[in-house]
């Protein structure tokens, strides 16, 4: 085996890269990764050549006491690139034993992740769980914690989309709406985020034609396929920032409103401890006194404020408390809430005739 410190470091880095079955690395990628690590940690290194890395890989494959079978997979994008991995996904030259605390933490994590249908590499997760049990680490019961679940029509779609996002793949998405279930529309997209809201999963992605961010309910996705010949454009910034001023998942260009509402004693503690939006603030002190003078017919309860753009989910949240939540300002939002409730009232009048 190579005896100098740098050679051993290179072998350890290559072992990690070959063990990583979630990413694809060519020889050139490995040269880049090794040089990056060496330059950051060893000031006296002059760079590692491709030839040196090839010799290190041959050493791992044929001369190490634990000879490693290395699989070389041809890229599917038509290029001649070959990706290198250990053929045995459990193999590593430098395996480390888990402490009981680490094993317990992993088991707890697997128990939580195992509740998400369609999780990518779910079979691998179950294999790891079984492996921990095999070596004497007690498994965490699966039902200590429970999440509300709404099944996705295509059960593996969430895992495939997760992979497409993590591997930065442009995709062609085939989608239908509830209104026109038999009409399938195609979208060429840069996928960025999977988000759960109200027990339903959504994909957020940029349209390649105009770069507009769109959302797609996973239960209405017919299918999709990667487009490896197309260049993926990452989102510029944090994709989660698009939700800063909205409730739910419906994106809108509406202005941000300062919405003031009153909640009765029956529901104010619930609203205070489970805010409608991250911007929610309790109105207190002199501002509370001013509101009570302005609305003397509102007895007890509390006044709150949120800063949001108007969308479908906002109106639904504001009307979901019935008479226990009244929108006071602005007039525009109050009007929309009133119209919504009036339509509901009219429907009840019809069915009660």
Image (tube, rainbow, N blue to C red):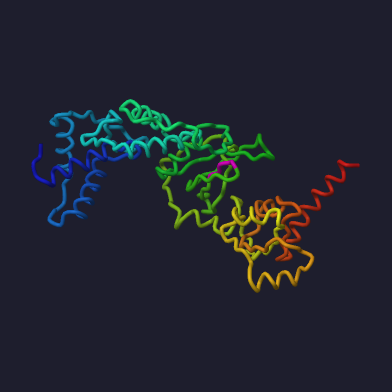
Q: Is residue 78 above or below residue 346?
A: above
Q: Is residue 18 magenta?
A: no
Q: Quadrant of the C terminus?
A: top right
- The structure residue drawn at horizontal position 83% and vertical position 45%, both measured from the top left corner, is 347
Please state the extent of the stretch shown in magenta in the rendering. Answer: 199-203
Residue 251 in view, yes or no: no
Front-most of residues 249 and 230: 249
Front-most of residues 93 and 277: 277
Q: Is residue 164 above or below residue 318?
A: above
Front-most of residues 303 and 18: 303
Outermost residue, left direction? 3
Q: Is residue 200 magenta?
A: yes
Residue 220 rendering spot, x and y as whole percentages? 60, 38
- The structure residue drawn at horizontal position 61% and vertical position 57%, both measured from the top left corner, is 272
Residue 81 rendering spot, x and y as whole percentages? 29, 38
In the image, is 50 to the left or to the right of 214? left
Residue 288 in view, yes or no: yes
Task: Choose top left, top right, bottom left or bottom right for residue 19.
Answer: top left
Residue 28 rendering spot, x and y as whole percentages? 24, 44
In the image, is 52 to the left or to the right of 69? left
Outermost residue, right direction? 353
Name the main secondary structure of what is drawn in magenta: strand
Front-most of residues 210 and 215: 215
């Amino acid at each position: 085996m190579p005896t100098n410190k740098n050679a051993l470091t290179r072998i350890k880095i290559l072992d990690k890269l070959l063990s990583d079955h979630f990413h694809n690395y060519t020889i050139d990628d490995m040269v880049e990764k090794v040089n990056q690590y060496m330059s950051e940690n060893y000031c006296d290194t002059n760079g590692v050549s491709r030839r040196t890395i090839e010799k290190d890989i041959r050493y791992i494959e044929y001369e190490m006491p634990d000879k490693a079978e290395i699989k070389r997979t041809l890229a599917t994008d038509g290029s001649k690139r070959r990706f290198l991995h250990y053929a045995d996904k459990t193999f590593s030259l430098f395996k480390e034993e888990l402490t009981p605390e680490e094993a317990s933490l992993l088991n707890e994590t697997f128990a939580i992740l195992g509740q998400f249908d369609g999780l990518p590499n779910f079979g691998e997760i179950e294999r790891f769980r079984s492996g921990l049990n095999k070596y004497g680490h007690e498994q965490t019961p699966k039902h200590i914690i429970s999440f509300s679940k709404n099944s996705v029509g295509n059960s593996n779609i969430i895992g495939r989309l997760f992979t497409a996002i993590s591997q930065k793949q442009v995709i062609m998405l085939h989608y239908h709406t509830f209104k026109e279930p038999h009409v399938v529309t195609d979208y060429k997209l840069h996928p960025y985020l999977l988000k759960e809201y109200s027990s339903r999963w959504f994909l957020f992605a940029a349209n390649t034609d105009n770069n507009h961010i769109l959302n797609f309910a996973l239960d209405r996705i017919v299918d999709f396929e990667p487009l490896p010949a197309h260049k993926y454009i990452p989102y510029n910034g944090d994709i989660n920032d698009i939700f800063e001023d909205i409730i739910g998942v419906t994106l809108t260009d509406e202005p941000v409103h300062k919405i003031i509402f009153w909640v009765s004693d029956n529901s104010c503690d619930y609203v205070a401890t489970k805010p409608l939006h991250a911007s929610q603030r309790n109105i207190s002190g002199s501002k509370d006194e001013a509101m009570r003078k302005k609305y003397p017919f509102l007895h007890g309860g509390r006044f709150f404020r949120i800063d949001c753009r108007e969308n479908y989910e906002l109106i639904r949240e504001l009307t979901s408390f019935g008479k226990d939540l009244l929108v006071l300002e602005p007039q525009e939002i109050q009007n929309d809430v009133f119209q919504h409730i009036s339509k509901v009232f009219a429907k009840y009048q019809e069915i009660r005739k």
